[in-house]
Amino acid sequence: MIVAPGPALSALKQATSTIPIVIAAASGPVGSGYVQSLSRPGGNITGLSLQSVDTVGKRLELLKELVPDAAPVAVLWDRGNFTYWPAAEAAARDRGWKLLSVEVRDVGQIEAAFKAATDARAGALLVDAGPVHFPQRGRVAELAARNRLPAMYELRPFVEAGGLISYGVDINDIWRRAAGYVDKILKGAKPADLPIEQPTRFELVINLKTAKALGLTIPQSLLLRADEVIQ
């Protein structure tokens, strides 16, 4: 059996169609073509979804509440999370907001991505948690602060690394729950018959220290909804 994060699935799906794979924290397993459906995965892959693509609109709403000006929001996304940009674009179109697509293919392009955002006069950032950005979350948060760009992330570790705000699932809880799938498969269950589990609880985390450094005042409405405020 293999237990893996979402970014590893592309390589794993090509490597094997027989070894059971439990995914922990996959952004969009159906849209990415890893499983047939959430209720009936149909192959050797099952596990848990981050539902990050489905909640892009909510992250944009929270970011616009924090930074309501008309400047475009730059979306930093990477090819390993290729469904993120179309979802963000659709959510923004429905709300009449302007976005700027900034694709980051590898670590060496991160600084250039920030330059592209500032050159385009972006007013804020929406950053995915794909295979490029998540391991580099400290650097991404530092570049956002250096360029004075308020940034919304999808996972708490970005904010713990100095990022401004995040809205998404508790990634540690997701990994703990993956153990339940391992147990069921070891006892004879087939991945094809185990539904992909979707998160039921999302957390809003705000870093006040970062907000102060950016000269931002967090609206009281956001502070009251926050699950955690980092001082």
Image (cartoon, grey):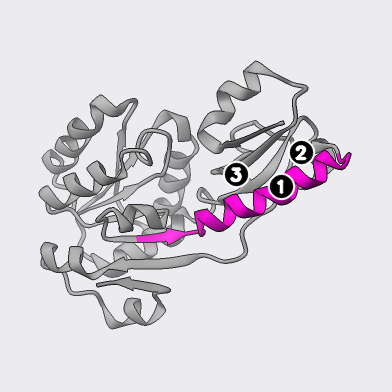
How far from the left and from the top, in percent, is residue 165? Answer: 32, 62
**From the viewer's perspective, is 197 left or right of 87?**
right
User: Which residue bears the numbered disc 2?
Assistant: 41
**From the viewer's perspective, is 219 left or right of 34?**
left
Residue type for callout 3? Ala
Does the segment drawn in magenta span residue 24?
Answer: no
Q: Earlier in the sequence, mark 1 or mark 2?
A: 2
User: Which residue bears the numbered disc 3?
Assistant: 24
**Residue drawn where x is 75% and y is 31% of the image:** 20
Quadrant of the image occupied by residue 65: bottom left
Q: Write the start and end of the magenta stretch as one range.
A: 166-189
- Disc 1/disc 2 C-alpha distance (Å): 7 Å
Assess disc 1: are there few (<14), some (14-19) or many (≥20) residues with their C-alpha within 10 Å of its C-alpha. Answer: many
Determine which of the numbered discs, if any, sits on residue 196 in the image. 1
Q: Earlier in the sequence, mark 3 or mark 2?
A: 3
Q: Main secondary structure of the magenta part?
A: helix
